[in-house]
Amino acid sequence: MLVPAALAILAWQTSVLAACYLAQVTAYFGVTSWLMDGTATDLAVSTVLSWSLAIAAGALMSAALPVRHHAARQEGSHPTWPHVTVVGALQFIQAYLVLTQQSGYSAQINLGRLNPTGLLGILSAAAPVLTLTLLFACLVTRRHERLAIGLTVLQAGILTASGLRGASVVFMLAVLVGSLIVVPADSPWRRRRRMALVGLSTLVLVATMFTLAAVVKSEAAEAAGLSSSGTQLVETDTVVETVARRLDLSSYLDTGLRFRGNDAALDAVALSNQVVVAIPRALWPDKPEGDYGQRVAAIFYGSTSGKTSSTITTVGDTALNLGWGLPLAGLLLGLVLCRLEGRVRQRATTGALVTTAVLAYRVVGQESPVVIIGANALRDFLVVICIWLACDAVAKRSSRSRSQSNHSLKM
């Protein structure tokens, strides 16, 4: 717990993303285990420490490399009504899928997948990242800020209604992380009083949404006859224990490391299989059925339902696939996070804002394997950048038409 925390503090001046990642390691593998009086194996402890040290070393190494500086901070397109309208449309699609039980926890236990396949599923998955992009663009340009904040809260509410307790938490943390990166130093949002108010409000919002999502999950599980300790409601006298149990990942890492010599387990998490899972079905209609989380649940935890998923954590998956190459992977991860963040801070272009939204959203959480995180990040980036540029084109065309109309009236 102490070493990743110290490394997070050390990396803070170099990279917010790397510091955030290390702070999560502290929480997920250290603080939660301590609160639950858990005892991690020596192998799990050494694995987490190696991973943390490598990420911090990568971030510090990146800071020591030369960076090409730009004369002026460049900004991307200003958010306009086409951007706001499209964000609202994607949120509507996601809300519709959640309320009709085609997405979220109900879909997972009834259909065996979190999101539907096809265009609707892709747009629904991209809605949080597009919302983050709009928020960051509004904070940078100081336009439509209140509207963007309202849409951000609405997006968090939709994620809460999905019944996935961690979804809204991840989203709100991504809001904070991304804002720390893109908001200019002279912005009113950098004032200490406002930052403290935003942090406190976010904490209250996260706690409320976690509790409400637990209610949705419990009702869905009870309706499907799958009620268990993992779907019970959060009660006042057990809230700390419940949250700690939900966030604790040390036991999952222990389970994953116990299977490091099992051929069936290694095949289930093999990088080649992860690449297949990451390919969109729209590009490969006949892609074999198979979900990484379902395979892990079946092989590592003995699940037989076929409609649930589990994890061996990001670091656990990396350890099983790379073995002694784990520190190298951590070093590369810290290096990449720091370099990308440095570029974003210098140039607040459209591409930089989308990159920030993707990184902030995907760097929160330690459950998915690196390959799938990277594939989802690439998919989100391509979808969101295309949508944003299309909105730019519509906005420019509309502005040109208004200008010509005004010119004609003056004539």
Image: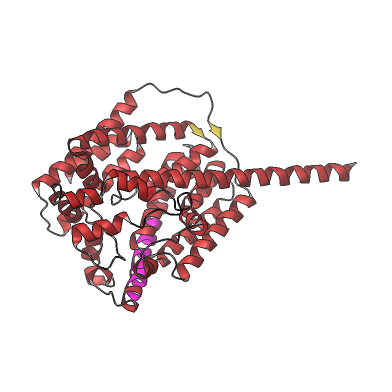
Which quadrant of the figure has residue 156? Answer: bottom left
Horizontally, is 363 left or right of 83 in the view?
left
Q: Is residue 211 magenta?
A: yes
Tell me where residue 84 appears, x and y as whole percent: 59, 53
Question: Can the viewer see residue 177?
Answer: no
Tell me where residue 307 appears, x and y as whole percent: 31, 66
Horizontally, is 371 left or right of 90 in the view?
left
Q: Nearer the viewer, residue 98 or 306?
A: 306
The relative height of residue 306 versus residue 148 in the rendered view (above or below) is: below
The relative height of residue 317 versus residue 72 in the rendered view (above or below) is: below
Tell me where residue 174 appears, x and y as whole percent: 40, 49
Magenta segment: 202-219
Residue at 28 percent across and 70 percent down: it is: 231
Horizontally, is 317 left or right of 362 in the view?
left
Q: Main secondary structure of the magenta part?
A: helix
In the rendered image, the residue lying farthest to the front is 286
Q: Nearer the viewer, residue 63 or 89?
A: 89
Residue at 28 percent across and 31 percent down: it is: 58
Residue at 33 percent across and 28 percent down: it is: 62
Q: Nearer the viewer, residue 201 or 354?
A: 354
